[in-house]
Image: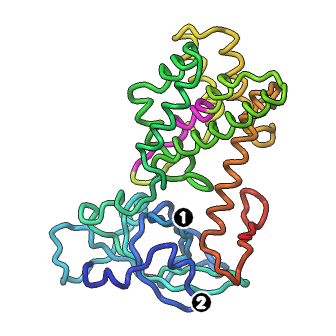
Amino acid sequence: MSDAQSILKNSQEIRKLGSGTSFKAIFVVSSLFQKNDKNGKPYYEMAVTDSFGTIEAKIWSDASWFDRSDPNMEASSTAKRLEDEKLRSLAGCSVGIDGKTTEFRGQTQFNFNKITLLDQDKFPPSQYLPRSPISLEELVKRYEELVSSCRPEVAEFIRFVYDGDTWKQFRDWPAAVSHHHAYANGLLEHTLSVTDCAKSMAESLRTSGYDIDVDIVVAGGLLHDLGKLGSYRMGSIPEMTLEGAVLDHIAIGYSKFMELAEKSGLDNSLKLQIAHILLSHHGQREFGSPVVPATPEAMVVSSADELDFRVFCWKDSVKDLTEDQPISQWHQATGRRFWNR
């Protein structure tokens, strides 16, 4: 691959290419679904990821699939056709892509014409996956500062929750499989962003004379996505678990929180207030919350969570826009186009 390295593109560069431009790249396959076109011919929709982001592409029936995953294969030897069994299990694998940009209904579309399964030891998927842009050392430092700012009873419980393997997962897990913070350390980054924002709002409200417990806000912020430890996993790509798909992270997080609160002997008033934040942090029932925020602390955490999600989506949507293209494409999850003012 060294000879071709100079012509390889990353996802950020590819998204800026004009229609009709060919490209080569190395990605990790996030998802692959087979469908049929209007003529009944099979085609695939593939989502691929690198450290710069994600691209969704079409793979039509005339595309070529090759297998160069054998570590003993000489670089000069002809690649064999990818077997159907391996094709169906491509998710999480690094692949070489030959593709071309096209225009469909006024929007840029990416077509992959040649897909090659690579040697996973020589091209490890982890090498091409995104991580939080903030260093892990900085994230851990911010976490410790937030926990230490709480009164002892609250701080001790947070440390009790995030201990051992739970801490390792909380540190490394993604916050989602798409939309926001869908990368390694993403859950920790999102949680800290929400908690920092919520703490600032709570302190401002206290200064304005409102009765609000800042420590409960911090605890609720740090624990609000506890259920994502059971909803997602960080393999070679961020993945949703079966439990996450059929139960959702709010239910999983509430159940886990109540178990740990009972085990630690957490004060009943603190337990109920923090549990309410976990159950209500999506703000509205139609967004998945079993209850709506009914305390100042819950309202603050819910608002901070929603704000962090939307601002992240704004940043991700406008980062590749050119000066003559200030408005993003339609963002389905937030129901809007974003403006790079």
Foreground residue, 312 or 40? 312
Location of the C terminus (image quadrant)? bottom right
Counting from the top left corner in percent of width and height, residue 168 is at: 40, 35
Counting from the top left corner in percent of width and height, residue 108 is at: 64, 81
Numbered circle sitting on residue 19: 2
- Label 1: which residue? 33
Counting from the top left corner in percent of width and height, residue 71 is at: 19, 66
Counting from the top left corner in percent of width and height, residue 154 is at: 58, 17
* Identity of the residue drawn at 61% across and 36% down: 249
Amino acid type of disc 2?
Ser
> Which residue is at the far bottom?
20
Residue 223 colored in magenta in the image: yes
Determine whether, in the image, residue 273 is placed left or right of residue 131. Answer: right
As drawn, 183 above or below 93: above
Residue 278 colored in magenta in the image: no
* Identity of the residue drawn at 32% across and 77% down: 81
Numbered circle sitting on residue 216: none
Foreground residue, 28 or 184? 184
Magenta span covers which residues? 222-235
